[in-house]
Image (tube, rainbow, N blue to C red):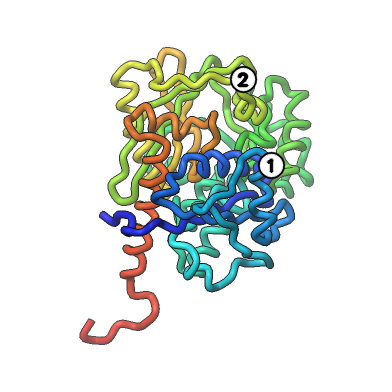
Amino acid sequence: MTGLPPRRVRLALLFGGRSPEHDVSLTSARSVLAALDPARFEVALMAIGRDGRWLPGPASQGLLSETTPVAGSAVRALDAGGLVPDANLGAMVDVVFPLLHGPFGEDGTVQGLLELLNLPYVGAGVVASATGMDKALMKALFLQRALPVLPHRVLTRHSWVSRRDAILQMLRASPGFPCFVKPSNMGSSIGVSRVDTVDALGPALDVAFQYDLKVLVEQGVPGYREIECGVLGNDAPTVSVPGEITMRTAFYDYHTKYTEGEASLEVPARVRPETATALQAMALEAFAAIDCAGMARVDFLVSPDESEIWVSEINTIPGFTPYSMYPRLWEASGLSYPDLITRLVELALERHEARASLLRDRIPTREG
C-alpha cells in the first residue's frame, strides 16, 4: 500500500468549473480546506471560472476567501492562468483533488487532462468518470452486472424536437406516472422533474433538454426510501454503513440538497440487517461495474417494506459540503473527515504508481 511521503504533501484543490454546480464545488472546496491538517499538507488552490478559464492565483484564492480565510503558511495559490495549467505543474504539486461537480469536471474531461500531465489525482479515472456522469450508459453497465434498475427510456433532443407528439404518446403508457425526467449528464438534481400527469410531461422534457442532448424518463416508486452507501478504495474497496435521506419535498431536488434543514440524513439508516448487507454488496458491484477507483457514493431506491431495491446511480465525486452524505457515511463507519481525505490522497498515489508501471511508451521486444 502506498502511503504519504515523509514530507508535507503538496495537494492541489481544483474547484469551480463551468457546470451549474459551480457554487456546490466552492462549498466542497471550503470544507476540504478547513479539514486539512497543515502539518501533513501544503495546499495549493486552483480554480476554474464559470467560463471555463483557469484562473490566476489571486483569483483562485479570492473565490474561497469570501467566506473562508485561506491565508497561512500551508496554503498558497497556483498561477495556472490560461486555457490549460502549466505543463510543469507536476513540479509544484504531488496530488490533485478535483472537487468539480457535474459536467466539465466529474465527467472525465479534467481527469483526461490530468492524465496527459501525468499527475496523480483523487477519484475515478477517465472512463469511470464519464460513465458515472452519463446515467444512460451507467444503467446499461448496471444491467450487464444484473443489478436491478428501474424501467426507463432514453431520449435524444433530436428525437424530441422531430417527434414530440409521438414521444408523448409513447410515454403515456411507459414508464407511466409518476415518473422522473432527468438530463443524462448532470448532477445535484439540476434539470430533474417529478412528473405526475400527462400535461406536465412535455414541459419537464423541455427543461431537461436545456441541460443535455440526452434525457432519461424513469419510472417512479410510490413511497420509496432513498438510501446511500459510500465506497472507498481501488482494487479492494470497502463500503460504508448505509444512510437514509428524508425530506419534506416531493423529491431530493437541488434546493433540498443544498439548503440546511430541508433534508434529514439518518446514519446509519434504519433498515433490517439483511437489507443493509444487500445494499453494501450492490454498492460494491456498482463500483466495479463502471471500473471505479478512489471513491463513490451509490444511491438506491428501496420500497417501503424493503422487499425491493433498485440502484439509482453512482456519483464519482460526491459532495464534500457540510451537509453531504459521503463524509457522514464514513464518519459513522469509523473514518473521520480528515482521515478520509488522507486516505483518498493515499489511494490517488497508489493508483498513479500502479499505472506508471505499465508499458505504454514502447513496443515490447521478442524477448518480452
Where residue 154 sits, quadrant-wise, is: top right
Task: Where is residue 15? Give x, y as percent.
Answer: 60, 50
- Nearest the viewer among 269 and 258 is 258
From the viewer's perspective, is residue 303 above or below residue 348? above
Task: Give, as a three-letter code, the residue at label 2.
Answer: Glu
User: Residue 66 has which mark?
Assistant: 1
From the viewer's perspective, is residue 133 above or below residue 257? below
Task: Where is residue 57? Give x, y as percent.
Answer: 64, 59
Q: Residue at x 34, y 46 (%)?
A: 233
Q: Residue furthest front?
A: 73
Q: Residue at x 30, y 26 (%)?
A: 277
Task: Left or right? Give the position of 1 relative to 206.
Answer: left
User: Residue 262 has which mark?
Assistant: 2
Task: Left or right? Give the position of 197 relative to 336.
Answer: right
From the viewer's perspective, is residue 278 above or below residue 270? below
Front: mark 2 or 1 = 1
